Image (cartoon, rainbow, N blue to C red):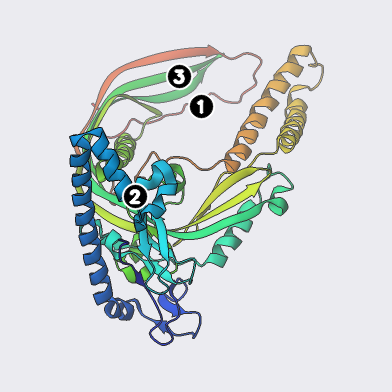
């Protein structure tokens, strides 16, 4: 039997209600009425409770059915086949059989407005009936332990997402000329994506090799005197609500790339924010996602700790160790616009933060434009460096080689920068944005002087004025 759903309809005209990101209210596009989240939440409280109860009963029936099926299959192959044949006759649930191996991951629901049967993915919590157009909520998917603690409502409309995608193409020097005009927007959908939010702290300690350089000139030599130190640090960094998307359908790197969300607008979860958008419950557990969040926290804690070794010319970590301690895990759904385009047989997926409007996605690279930019920049840099190196009588072959080498380096760097603009989607490895203000709380801070070394480099064919000394002073507290 299909599980019960709730269709959010206008109390004035029974038209479909949708959450309007611009006003923060539920709006009816038929009669123009609008209602607060609290008003609709109160109005549909009984219906949602009934739907949740129906979901619980359906789950219990499914468990008993699975147990009976397992018992029959265990009694013998022929019994299992007979039971399966009998079960497959005239059952409404057999609409899912055409899905093959994916049938176990599909669920059937009845639209309460038109009675049509909806076949959805097992994680779907909010959708739209394709027959009558009503926004359909499946309360049972967000019931009990599956209910999110928080939600950040949509703040950006569909049109804003489309406009943001068009603006995203601008300024991309390596974008093929035909991409902006020829690629087709295949699909755009607003989705409430499930996230786990992790709060806790990281205990970190590290031993660092630090060096303080003083450079001066003695006659024909440049002398570098280096004072070497050993820096010992130990402390704690606290983190709050590091997000990790909990949907296997969402690319982790894409979701990481639209961070951060503004937590000042986070609010208690309500189904009344769902109408008009798709929503999914989590299908990746908090333990699995927790490993990603802890890794980000550890990396950021290591950075924070090393940053406390200050006043030196260079600092290198000799050893470091970080231990993450989880204190609290919360469940939330955040707004995301997903835009799918197609160009020359290739699919491109873009995501926009439905709250802040941050757009991200990988773009194709024109090899021709890449070559033009590389060669053009190389010629320009060659002329610049050549004007300095190829002066007077110094026009040997080695001078040309040196000028070309100097021109090649910035040309390669520029090329890498331009390509990185086209491929910005990446997994996030740090959690600095979620670290507590004040940074690391130090428990150990010791800097110990080790030795002094000196190096001399003979200056050849160089005319440099003076012989001034760079009197760098070692950090406070050195022994």
Task: Indicate the position of residue 477 as horizontal and vertical percent values.
Answer: 24, 33
Q: Is residue 250 visible?
A: no
Task: Please give the name of the residue rendered at 39% of the width and 66% of the height, measured from the top-left corner.
Answer: 153
**Residue 224 has which mark?**
3
Question: Horizontal placement of 163 versus 451: left or right?
Answer: right
Question: Between marks 3 and 2, how big is the CA–CA gap?
Answer: 85 Å
Tell which of 277 and 74 is nearer to you: 74
Count of numbered circles in the view? 3
Task: Please give the name of the residue rendered at 59% of the width and 43% of the height, measured from the top-left corner.
Answer: 421
**Residue 468 has which mark?**
1
Question: Between marks 3 and 1, how big is the CA–CA gap?
Answer: 13 Å
- Assess disc 3: are there few (<14), some (14-19) or many (≥20) residues with their C-alpha within 10 Å of its C-alpha: some
Q: Quadrant of residue 466?
A: top right
Task: Indicate the position of residue 345 as horizontal and vertical percent values.
Answer: 66, 43
Labels 1, 2: front one: 2
Tell which of 327 and 144 is nearer to you: 144
Mark 3 or mark 2: whose residue is earlier in sequence:
2
Task: Indicate the position of residue 281 as horizontal and vertical percent values.
Answer: 33, 55
Residue receiving disc 2: 88
Task: Please give the name of the residue rendered at 50% of the width and 59% of the height, measured from the top-left corner.
Answer: 189
Q: Are marks 3 and 1 in contact (CB under 8 Å)?
A: no
Labels 3, 2: front one: 2
Question: Above or below — where is 312 with respect to 21?
Answer: above
Mark 1 or mark 2: whose residue is earlier in sequence:
2
Regarding mark 2 in the picture, which secondary structure is present there? Answer: loop
Location of the C terminus (image quadrant)? top left
């Amino acid at each position: 039997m299909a599980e019960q759903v709730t269709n959010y309809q206008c109390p004035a005209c029974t038209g479909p209600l949708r959450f309007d990101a611009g006003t923060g209210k539920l709006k009816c596009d038929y009669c123009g009425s609008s209602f607060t989240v609290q008003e609709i939440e109160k109005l549909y409280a009984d219906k949602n409770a009934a739907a949740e109860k129906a979901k619980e009963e359906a789950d219990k029936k499914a468990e008993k059915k699975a147990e009976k099926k397992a018992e029959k299959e265990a009694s013998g192959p022929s019994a299992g086949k007979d039971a399966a044949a009998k079960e497959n006759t005239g059952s409404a649930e057999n609409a899912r059989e055409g899905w093959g191996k994916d049938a176990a991951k599909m669920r059937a629901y009845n639209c309460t407005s038109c009675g049509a049967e909806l076949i959805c993915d097992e994680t779907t919590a909010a959708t739209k009936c394709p027959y009558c157009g009503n926004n359909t909520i499946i309360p049972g998917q967000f019931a009990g332990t599956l209910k999110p603690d928080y939600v950040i409502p949509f703040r950006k409309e569909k049109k804003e997402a489309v406009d943001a995608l068009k603006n995203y193409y601008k300024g991309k020097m390596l974008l093929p000329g035909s991409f902006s005009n020829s690629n087709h927007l295949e699909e755009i959908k607003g989705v409430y994506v499930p996230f786990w939010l992790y709060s806790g702290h990281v205990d970190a300690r590290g031993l660092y090799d630090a060096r303080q350089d003083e450079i001066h000139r003695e006659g024909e030599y440049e002398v570098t005197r280096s004072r070497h130190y050993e820096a010992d640090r130990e402390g704690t960094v606290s983190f709050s609500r590091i997000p990790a998307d909990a949907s296997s359908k969402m690319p982790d790197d894409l979701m990481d790339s639209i961070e951060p969300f503004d937590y000042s607008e986070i609010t208690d979860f309500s189904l009344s924010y769902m109408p008009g958008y798709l929503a999914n419950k989590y299908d990746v557990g908090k333990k699995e996602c927790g490993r990603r969040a802890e890794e980000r926290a550890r990396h950021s804690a290591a950075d924070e700790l090393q940053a406390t070794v200050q006043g030196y010319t260079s600092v290198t970590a000799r050893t470091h160790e970080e231990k993450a301690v989880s204190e609290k895990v919360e469940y939330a759904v955040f707004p995301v616009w997903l835009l799918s385009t197609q160009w020359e047989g290739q699919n491109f997926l873009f995501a926009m933060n439905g709250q802040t409007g941050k757009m991200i996605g990988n773009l194709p690279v024109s090899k021709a434009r890449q070559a033009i930019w590389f060669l053009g920049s190389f010629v320009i840099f060659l002329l610049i460096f050549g004007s300095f190196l190829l002066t007077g009588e110094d026009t040997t072959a080695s001078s040309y080689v040196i000028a070309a080498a100097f021109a090649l380096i910035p040309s390669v760097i520029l090329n890498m920068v331009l390509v990185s603009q086209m491929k910005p989607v990446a997994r996030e490895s740090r959690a600095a944005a979620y670290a507590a203000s004040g940074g690391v709380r130090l428990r150990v801070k010791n800097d110990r002087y080790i030795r002094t070394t000196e190096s001399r480099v003979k200056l050849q064919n160089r005319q440099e004025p003076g012989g001034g000394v760079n009197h760098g002073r070692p950090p406070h507290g050195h022994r």
